[in-house]
Image (cartoon, rainbow, N blue to C red):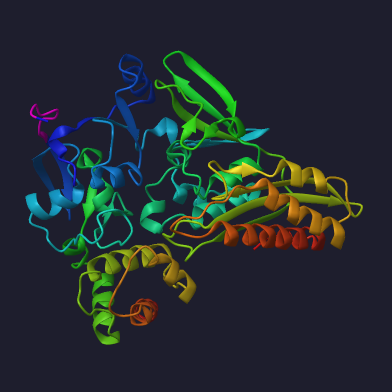
């Protein structure tokens, strides 16, 4: 049943400082809401647990993309449209720009935020494999101060995350060291817009003197959280991309995933797609095709 | 729940160029405020969960699904609905081409389609067919099969370029 708006408190602080102060005072009561593309869906369905909503939409401190010499800091309140329109994201972090472009439709992209995608913690979230591939770090902020945490340590289980009740994600930091990498991203779903992924991949690699100098492969929708394929990467590291290596990598990739049967797909289909996507990525990596799919 | 957590507040927003003050609970959906408080029933409710685009409006110039906007977030915002955009010349071209190309049948998706198309043409005056499809991908139509809608947008773009 639809929720009754009279049952919900709502605060819209004018600054990030005020927002974290409110969270510090009543840490477990306030649920942050940015563009509402997840929270309002639960609200409409009557399944929203929280009764107090803290709007962080459009807080200027959260909606900046800061370029520093070593990293780019993306404000957690940056929308998918902000990511798509950012020149530096397009140039240095194309996996993220591509994922932003196939999240929802244009109206969702104008409201959905990168920070929101992280804390909503869906295993099928489109932007998260890109963050894993780039080795992103998060800055969490609370009235107690700020801390940095590697994104790979952030999602600890299905919908579980390393974030205290009084903390907000302030920014997502991406190291600027992937220029010249081959990047490959694909979403396999009923359609790109709106549909939730059956499998999505974000992968990066660099080949030097015929051998894999660096490789990073991340997948969504094949485990309780988005995952990096560490074992597959080890199988590839330093190797020539010959048929035997590629076959071993495809097999290892499947063994590292734990896909399930659900309304969108089956475990068997997902495993086959994982193998094919890794194969297609390695073909492009071997060919030095920097464009990706 | 017997005790009401929230009280109605004054929300001031600009709707189709006019300043409006409504009294609303901040978690009321912008969609409901537009339709029920302001009588602007051109904005439709389809799915109510951001999948279908029938409730599309422009908020501070950006296309959004009004079913996913708590009106508390629209405080001070500039909202344009189908009733407002219908007065604009570019939109008139879209209205004409939707009629001529068969882009409107039952009509429920049409206001959202027009808003999404106008937003696209504002950003890209000469969109490719793929760009039109992407621009409208968040708007579902159960009648036309989309070909006529895409054609209507392409034709409107051609006419604006020729004008």
Looking at the picture, tell me which residue is in the foreground, A252 or A194: A252
Q: Main secondary structure of the magenta part?
A: loop
Looking at the picture, tell me which residue is in the foreground, B61 or A279: A279
Q: Which residues are magenta?
A: B2-9
Which corner quadrant of the image does residue A196 belong to?
bottom left
- Identified at 38% across, 25% down, the residue is A16
Q: x%, y% of residue B117?
A: 34, 68
Q: Is residue B128 visible?
A: no
Looking at the picture, tell me which residue is in the foreground, A122 or B154: A122
Q: Seen in the image, is A182 located left or right of residue B60?
A: right
- Identified at 20% across, 63% down, the residue is B82
Q: Seen in the image, is B89 located left or right of residue A270?
A: left
Q: x%, y% of residue A199?
A: 56, 56
Which corner quadrant of the image does residue A107 belong to?
bottom left
In the image, is residue A243 above or below residue B94? above
How many tags in the picture? 0
Q: Is residue A270 visible?
A: yes
Q: x%, y% of residue A11?
A: 25, 28
In the image, is residue A25 above or below residue B80? above
Looking at the picture, tell me which residue is in the foreground, B66 or B51: B51
The stretch drawn in magenta includes residue B145? no
In the image, is residue A20 above or below residue A173? above
- Identified at 47% across, 25% down, the residue is A163
Q: Seen in the image, is B90 located left or right of residue A96?
A: left
């Amino acid at each position: 049943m639809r929720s009754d708006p009279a049952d919900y408190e709502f605060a819209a602080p004018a600054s990030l400082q005020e927002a974290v102060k409110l969270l510090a005072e009543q840490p477990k009561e306030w649920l942050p809401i940015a563009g509402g593309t997840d929270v309002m869906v639960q609200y409409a369905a009557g399944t929203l647990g929280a009764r107090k909503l803290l709007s962080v939409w459009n807080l200027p401190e959260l909606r900046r993309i800061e370029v520093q010499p070593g990293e780019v800091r993306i404000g957690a309140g940056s929308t998918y449209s902000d990511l798509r329109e950012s020149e530096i994201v397009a140039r240095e972090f194309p996996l993220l720009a591509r994922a932003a472009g196939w999240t929802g439709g244009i109206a969702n992209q104008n409201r959905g935020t990168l920070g929101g995608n992280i804390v909503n913690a869906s295993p099928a979230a489109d932007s998260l494999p890109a963050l894993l591939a780039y080795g992103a770090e998060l800055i969490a902020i609370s009235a107690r101060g700020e801390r940095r945490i590697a994104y790979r340590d952030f999602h600890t289980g299905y919908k579980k995350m390393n974030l205290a009740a009084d903390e907000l994600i302030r920014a997502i930091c991406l190291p600027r060291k992937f220029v010249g990498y081959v990047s490959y991203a694909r979403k396999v779903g009923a359609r790109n817009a709106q549909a939730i992924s059956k499998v999505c991949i974000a992968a990066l690699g660099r080949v030097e003197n015929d051998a894999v100098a660096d490789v990073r492969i991340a997948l969504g929708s094949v485990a309780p959280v988005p995952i990096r394929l560490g074992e597959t990467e080890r199988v590839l590291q330093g190797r020539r991309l010959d048929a035997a290596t590629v076959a071993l990598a495809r097999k290892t990739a499947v063994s590292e995933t734990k896909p399930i049967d659900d309304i969108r797909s089956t475990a068997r289909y997902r495993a086959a797609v994982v193998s094919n996507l890794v194969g297609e990525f390695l073909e492009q990596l071997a060919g030095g095709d920097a464009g990706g799919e | 729940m017997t005790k009401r957590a929230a009280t109605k507040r004054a929300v001031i927003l600009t709707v189709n160029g006019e300043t409006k003050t409504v009294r609303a609970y901040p978690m009321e959906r912008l969609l409901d405020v537009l339709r029920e408080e302001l009588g602007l029933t051109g904005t439709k409710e389809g799915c109510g969960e951001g999948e279908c685009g029938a409730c599309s409006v422009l908020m501070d110039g950006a296309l959004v699904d009004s079913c996913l906007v708590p009106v508390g977030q629209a405080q001070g915002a500039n909202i344009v609905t189908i009733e407002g955009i219908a007065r604009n010349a570019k939109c008139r071209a879209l209205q004409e081409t939707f009629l001529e190309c068969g882009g409107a049948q039952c009509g429920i998706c049409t206001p959202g389609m027009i808003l999404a198309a106008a937003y696209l043409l504002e950003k890209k005056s000469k969109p490719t067919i793929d760009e039109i499809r992407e621009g409208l991908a968040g708007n579902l139509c159960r009648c036309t099969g989309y070909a006529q809608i895409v054609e209507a947008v392409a034709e409107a773009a051609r006419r604006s370029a020729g004008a």
